[in-house]
Amino acid sequence: MAVRVIAGAYKGRRLTAPSGMATRPTADRIKESIFNILAGDIIKKRVLDLFAGTGALGIEALSRGASFAVFVDKQKAALAAIQKNIRNIGLKDRTRIVKGDLLRNIRLLQSYTQPFDLVFMDPPYEINALNPVLSLLVISGVLSQDARIVVEHSIQESVEPVPEGLILTDQRQFGKILVSFVDVVL
């Protein structure tokens, strides 16, 4: 599947994706729907792209005006693809790449002094990571007071009940994929 930036400053730029089935890049129609829902709520936001794969969601946010993005993945091929995509587009000064498993080490993110405003999360479907990662995000203190988390997951998995401190505000179904929008509440 060809992966590309669909709008903004880097519209049309092709992104490298690792070969094989370990990474499932978000389809363009789903990505477009996500960003239509987010609309103007991207400008100057600090973005966290978890289980980043190609980095397409974080790069799309940067293309549409986000100020900074951190990409987290544990797969070597995914990290290499993200690094290549960032280098090819010229985003090195607005990004960081973190290698690691968030479920095993939440401290991966605690070195960032400014909280994240927008989080993209697309974990592998079979590892049951949705609620554990949402809980870790709340506990870690890395989210801003008005942060929004966009979770792409299988319709067979549920984000509900969401951890305390979060609220499910919207869900959209795309075939066998569900995109859940979860907001921080105080």
Image: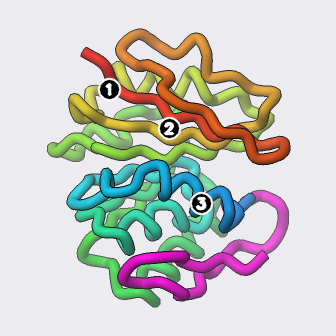
CB atoms of marks 3 and 1 within 8 Å:
no
**Amino acid type, label 2:** Leu
**Amino acid type, label 3:** Lys
Mark 1 highlights which residue? 140
**Amino acid type, label 1:** Ser
Q: Give the alpha-carbon distance from disc 3 to disc 2, as whole Å.
A: 23 Å
Q: Give the alpha-carbon distance from disc 2 to disc 1, as whole Å.
A: 11 Å
Q: Is residue 83 visible?
A: yes
**For the magenta stretch, what is the residue range?**
1-22
Asked if residue 79 is positioned above or below residue 139 in the image, the reply reads below
Mark 3 or 2, nearer chain start:
3
Q: Give the alpha-carbon distance from disc 3 to disc 1, as whole Å.
A: 27 Å
Describe the element under mark 1 as helix, strand or loop.
helix
* x 83%, y 61%: residue: 21
Mark 2 or 1, nearer chain start:
2
Mark 2 highlights which residue? 102
CB atoms of marks 3 and 2 within 8 Å:
no
Mark 3 highlights which residue? 31
State the residue in front, 101 or 65. Answer: 65
Mark 3 or 1, nearer chain start:
3
Q: How is the image coloured?
A: rainbow
* x 36%, y 46%: residue: 118
Q: Left or right: 13 with respect to 19?
A: left
* Residue 154 location, quadrant: top right
State the residue in front, 86 or 186. Answer: 186
* Residue 54 location, quadrant: bottom right
Asked if residue 126 is positioned above or below residue 36 in the image, the reply reads above
* x 57%, y 49%: residue: 51
Which one is in front in this view, the residue at disc 3 or the one at disc 2?
3
* x 78%, y 32%: residue: 155
Neighbor class of circle 2 (other Cα within 10 Å; few <14, some 14-19, many 20+) is many
Q: Position of residue 172 (x, y in %)?
A: 65, 39
